């Protein structure tokens, strides 16, 4: 009925015009101020129809009255009245044009600045009503006035309310709104003990949340782009608040989930802030990342796991190698080294590990390991490590490709390194996992399992069952041996290597008297195996078993497997000769080597010198490594070196096979380790100069081997004193060459593997 009555009124005005308008307009005005809400709604409907049916000239005559009526209706307490008044304003604007804005808006702006809260609220309602219909024209006019610095509480509240009415247009002005809001929050958040400023900060934050909540989906991209541009500001407070702004974007848009396409931008900006120098920025970043992992499903975030890993790797690389960086030293990412610093990222990696395809699992496991490396033990302790460990142990036994298993075992090894005693409860699961991996078809998986077992030994308290299982597997008698998948030789080799590692790192924890002897017997049985890899690994087991059993057992083993073979050495097979050389090297390299009987030692020296001239390169390789151990255990190393240097130098001849040349370097490394300073004496000068020649002109693999030897020989890790000792003895040409390789190569070597 209201609509019909309004149309009738409009029809009358259209037909009678100037005759009835002087009568109708005052009636409508009076009804607006005296009537109830239904009457006021009717007034707006009627006035809208009157305006639509009148000419511009007719309206201008009564413009002052009409503007006042429309303005008051726009500020009405009733929502429906305000909505109809907005339509009325729209009709007036269509007839009169921009003059409508000029007549109404200034008065509303003045009202918004009023100290009277009721008047201010009414003016804001009126402004919101106008903006709902004419935002394109009005926003460019009103936004600069509202954003005038410093942002007042009333302006902040007004902007928040206006954003709700202009959700589909306000984002056009984000290039001025967002920087202003961030700058204002950044400026007031630094002020302490000022209640007025605190209230202004709260109002600005309310406004920021309202803008983020109200903006239309089409404006989310612009919103995030503007915020992201402030994350790299040179001002600490701006970076902090930009991260907070990303947090509220995530929180306020969570139910609509319309920002997922911009998640990579959010991830990029937040992860880059993890290396920020400010603790405040780091805390703000952590809160934003927490919001991301809480409000965005893990299955959505895991799609970006490769991107996350690459970002962190790039950031760490930049931190290491930029000017003033730590280089290859320890680097801890500041954002992860704070309370719960790693927690926001953990659900993403866990999801990838547990439910991703093989590529995602590999990336997640390897990426998690990389995060652990750059997080200190302090922030990995306790229940957090258990969260990391559980998913990895759960899926490592699944049918995963070798690359996934490698990544998982490596990361488990890192967790063991960082976790220590906190992981003691997991030792049985770790042990089962690593032992099972020894029979994996992939060689790299087996190698990583051996390394991981070495890390597990400090935590393990029940070594005897493990040794028993490894001995059985090495002899091919274990039920765990998967011959059809990996091959018996590969499994035996890996198991022997693992047994050697267990004896070396956990042998002193053995409680049963038969554990070490059974290991020794397994080594003895397999040191004559036809496969050279098994022989080398068996010799390792023999060496560490002898070290644990003492000098008497070591002498007996050498007597049985080395000295007693001397009469028939010339007719022995190359496999036997290779085994002899391997045993000599491994026993003499351990601490028990210095306690070997002098007669047996002399026999070893003679036999190894014979084997150094053998026709088979495999035997010569093992012998040249073993002669280094022989020299290392000598009571008079200088005289022994003078006696043996020419024989050793033959293995360094450029005509010799590359693997033999490398074996000589390996043997010299053993000597340099056991006899520090020997190669910085007059007696050692000859071999040091030969090594220098090969380090400069040999094949690349040979160069690397002799670089390692020179690093040990000159004790580069402890400064330049070793170089100075050499330079005092060497001739000019060698001294010049050594200086060059020292400065270009040797000082860059961090350490040499055992």
Image (spheres, grey):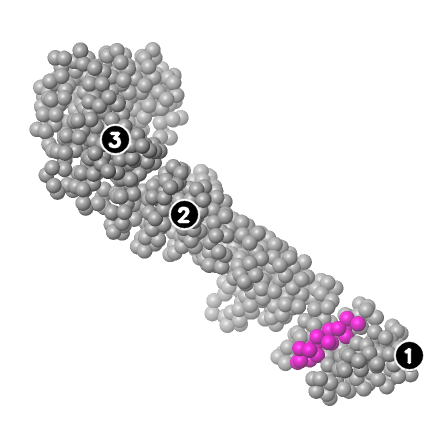
Q: Is residue 398 above or below residue 55?
A: above
Query: What percent of the width, then of the height, locates residue 505?
Result: 21, 38
Magenta residue span = 75-91
Residue under pointer 1: 15
Residue under pointer 2: 353
Callout 1–callout 2 Cβ contact below 8 Å:
no
Of pointers 2 and 3, the one earlier in the residue sequence: 2
Residue at disc 1, secondary structure: helix
Of pointers 1 and 2, the one earlier in the residue sequence: 1
Q: Residue at x 54, y 52 (%)?
A: 263
Query: Which quarter of the figure is the C terminus placed in?
Result: top left
Q: Horizontal placement of 498 versus 114: left or right?
A: left
Query: What percent of the width, then of the height, locates residue 156?
Result: 60, 68
- What's the distance in space between the residues labelled 2 and 3, CA to CA? 30 Å
Residue 492, numbered label = 3
Provide the major secondary structure of the magenta segment: helix
Residue 249 on the magenta span: no
Residue at disc 2, secondary structure: helix
Q: Residue at x 67, y 62 (%)?
A: 168
Of pointers 3 and 1, the one earlier in the residue sequence: 1
In this rendering, the label closer to the viewer, 2 or 3: 3
Query: Which quarter of the figure is the N terminus placed in?
Result: bottom right
Q: Is residue 463 above or below residue 654?
A: below
Other-residue count near label 2 (Cα within 10 Å), few / some / many at <14 / 14–19 / ≥20 = many
Query: What percent of the width, then of the height, locates residue 16?
Result: 91, 81
Q: Which image quarter: residue 6?
A: bottom right
């Amino acid at each position: 009925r209201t609509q019909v009555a309004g149309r009738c009124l409009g029809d009358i005005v259209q037909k009678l015009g100037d005759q009835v308008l002087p009568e109708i307009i005052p009636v409508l005005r009076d009804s607006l101020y005296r009537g109830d809400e239904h009457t006021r709604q009717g007034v707006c409907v009627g006035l809208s129809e009157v305006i639509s049916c009148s000419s511009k000239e007719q309206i201008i005559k009564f413009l002052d009255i009409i503007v006042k009526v429309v303005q008051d209706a726009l500020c009405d307490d009733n929502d429906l009245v305000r909505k109809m008044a907005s339509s009325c304003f729209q009709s007036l604007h269509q007839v009169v044009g921009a003059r409508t804005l000029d007549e109404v808006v200034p008065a509303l702006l003045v009202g918004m600045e009023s100290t009277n809260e009721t008047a201010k609220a009414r003016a804001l309602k009126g402004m919101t009503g106008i903006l709902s219909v004419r935002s394109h024209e009005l926003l460019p006019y009103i936004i600069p006035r509202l954003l005038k610095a410093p942002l007042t509480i009333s302006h902040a509240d007004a902007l928040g309310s206006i954003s709700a009415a202009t959700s589909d247009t306000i984002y056009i002005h984000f290039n001025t709104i967002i920087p202003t809001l961030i700058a204002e929050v950044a400026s007031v958040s630094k002020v302490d003990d000022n209640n007025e400023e605190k209230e202004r900060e709260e109002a600005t934050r309310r406004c920021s949340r309202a803008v983020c909540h109200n903006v239309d989906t089409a404006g989310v991209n612009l919103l995030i782009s503007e915020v992201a541009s402030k994350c790299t500001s040179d001002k600490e407070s701006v970076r902090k608040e930009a991260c907070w702004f990303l947090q509220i974007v995530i929180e306020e848009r969570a139910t609509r989930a319309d920002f997922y396409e911009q998640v990579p931008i959010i991830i990029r900006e937040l992860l880059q802030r993890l290396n920020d120098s400010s603790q405040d920025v780091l805390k703000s970043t952590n809160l934003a990342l927490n919001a991301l992992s809480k409000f965005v499903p893990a299955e959505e975030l895991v799609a970006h796991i490769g991107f996350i890993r690459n970002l962190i790797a790039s950031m760490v690389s930049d931190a290491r190698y930029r000017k003033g960086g730590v280089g290859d030293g320890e680097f801890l990412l500041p954002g992860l080294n704070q309370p719960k610093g790693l927690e926001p990222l953990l659900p993403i990696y866990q999801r990838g590990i547990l439910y991703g395809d093989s590529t995602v699992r590999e990336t997640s496991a390897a990426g998690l390991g990389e995060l652990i490396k750059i997080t200190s033990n302090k922030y990995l302790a306790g229940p957090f490590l258990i969260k990391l460990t559980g998913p990895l142990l759960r899926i490592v036994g699944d049918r995963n490709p070798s690359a996934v298993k490698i990544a998982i075992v490596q990361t488990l090894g890192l967790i063991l390194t960082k976790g220590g005693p906190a992981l003691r409860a997991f030792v049985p699961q770790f042990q089962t996992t690593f032992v099972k991996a020894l029979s994996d078809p992939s060689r790299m998986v087996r190698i990583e399992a051996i390394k991981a077992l070495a890390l597990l030994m400090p935590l393990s308290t029940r070594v005897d069952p493990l040794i028993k299982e490894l001995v059985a597997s090495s002899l091919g008698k274990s039920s765990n041996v998967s011959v059809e998948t990996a091959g018996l030789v590969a499994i035996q080799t890996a198991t022997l290597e693992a047994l050697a590692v267990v004896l070396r790192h956990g042998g002193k924890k053995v409680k049963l008297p038969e554990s070490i002897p059974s290991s020794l017997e397994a080594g003895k049985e397999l040191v004559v195996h036809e496969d050279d890899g098994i022989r080398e690994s068996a010799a390792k087991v023999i060496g560490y078993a002898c070290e644990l059993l003492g000098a008497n057992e070591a002498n007996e083993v050498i007597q049985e497997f080395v000295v007693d073979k001397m009469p028939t050495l010339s007719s022995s097979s190359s496999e036997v000769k290779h085994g002899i050389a391997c045993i000599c090297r491994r026993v003499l390299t351990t601490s028990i080597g210095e306690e070997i009987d002098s007669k047996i030692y002399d026999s070893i020296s003679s036999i190894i010198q014979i084997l150094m001239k053998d026709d088979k390169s495999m035997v010569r390789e093992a012998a040249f490594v073993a002669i280094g151990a022989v020299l290392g255990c000598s009571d008079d190393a200088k005289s022994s070196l003078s006696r043996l240097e020419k024989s050793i130098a033959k293995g360094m001849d450029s005509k010799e096979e590359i693997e033999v040349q490398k074996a000589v370097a390996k043997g010299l490394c053993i000597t340099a380790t056991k006899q520090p300073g020997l190669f910085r004496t007059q007696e050692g000068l000859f071999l040091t100069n030969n090594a220098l020649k090969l380090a400069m002109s040999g094949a690349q693999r040979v160069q690397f081997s002799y670089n390692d030897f020179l690093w040990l020989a000159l004790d580069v890790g402890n400064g330049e004193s070793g170089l100075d000792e050499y330079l005092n003895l060497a001739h000019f040409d060698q001294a010049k060459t050594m200086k060059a390789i020292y400065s270009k190569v040797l000082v860059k070597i961090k350490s040499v593997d055992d």
